[in-house]
Image (cartoon, rainbow, N blue to C red):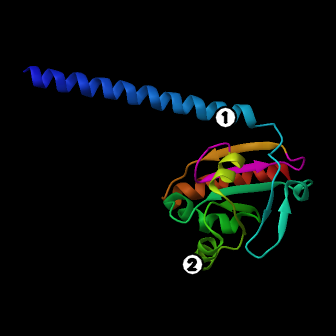
Amino acid sequence: MKILLLCLVIFYSTTISAQINYESYLHKNDSIVQLNVGKQFPSFTVQTLNGKIISDKDLLGRVTIFNFWFQYCAPCIAEFDALNALYQFISFTSDSAEAANESVIKYKLSFLVCPITEKECFRLNFNEGFPATIIVDKSGKIVLIKSGGSIEKDKIEIDIQKLASIIDRLL
């Protein structure tokens, strides 16, 4: 009986701790979004796989979608097809140029891919992880920060439709 009671106490404590940590994560995540929406997107200069140099200044005057991914991220890969059909945008990957090029070929990616360091990915996406999508308006201000994703095609399509609706309003 004492062992059962001890197990229940440990389970209950762990459950409460996990719930608090999850609520803390949600609050932190929400805070990151609240702190950054409406602010200027961080400055950057990157090189695409095809050698083109792009900086934040090159994108002023255009609505821009930034997507962050890496080769072994199932939700990242799951949204590739839908993203291919969306708009031309810039994607950042923490993969090496060689691994990124393999993904471009394997998944027939039609969007710009910029391999950058993991540290730089996290700087540009505010430590939101992968996948992460950020929409920036024509003045370079952040309109949306979305992190996480599904591997279910119907849920991905719904998310992409929401992104497309936001972009259409900005154009």
Q: Is residue 45 left or right of residue 103?
A: right
Disc 2 packing (10 Å; few <14; some 14–19; many ≥20): few
Label 1 sits on a secondary structure element that is: helix
In magenta segment, residue 132: yes
Name which residue lies at 64% across and 76% down: 101
Q: Is residue 100 above or below residue 151?
A: below
Which amino acid, by three-letter code, is at mark 2? Lys
Residue denoted by label 2: 106
Picture layout, residue 93 above or below residue 122: below
Toward the left, the furthest residue is 1
Q: Give 161 or 92, whichever is nearer the viewer.
A: 92
Given residues 170 and 134, the one toward you in this image is: 134
Please tell me which of labels 2 and 1 falls first in the chain. 1
- Crowding at dot 1, Cα within 10 Å, few <14 / some 14-19 / many 20+, comes out as some
The numbered mark at residue 32 is 1
Q: Residue 144 at x, y = what percent? A: 72, 43
Work out whether residue 61 can be spotted. Answer: yes
- Distance between the Cα atoms at labels 2 and 1? 34 Å
The residue lying at 77 percent from left, 43 percent from top is 143
Residue 162 in sight = no
In the picture, which quadrant includes the N terminus? Answer: top left
State the mark number for residue 12.
none
Percent from the top left, x then y, of residue 170? 83, 49
Name the image quarter holding residue 91: bottom right
Instruction: Please state which amino acid type lies under the numbered disc 1.
Output: Ile
Numbered range of the magenta stretch: 126-140
Q: Residue furthest right?
A: 61
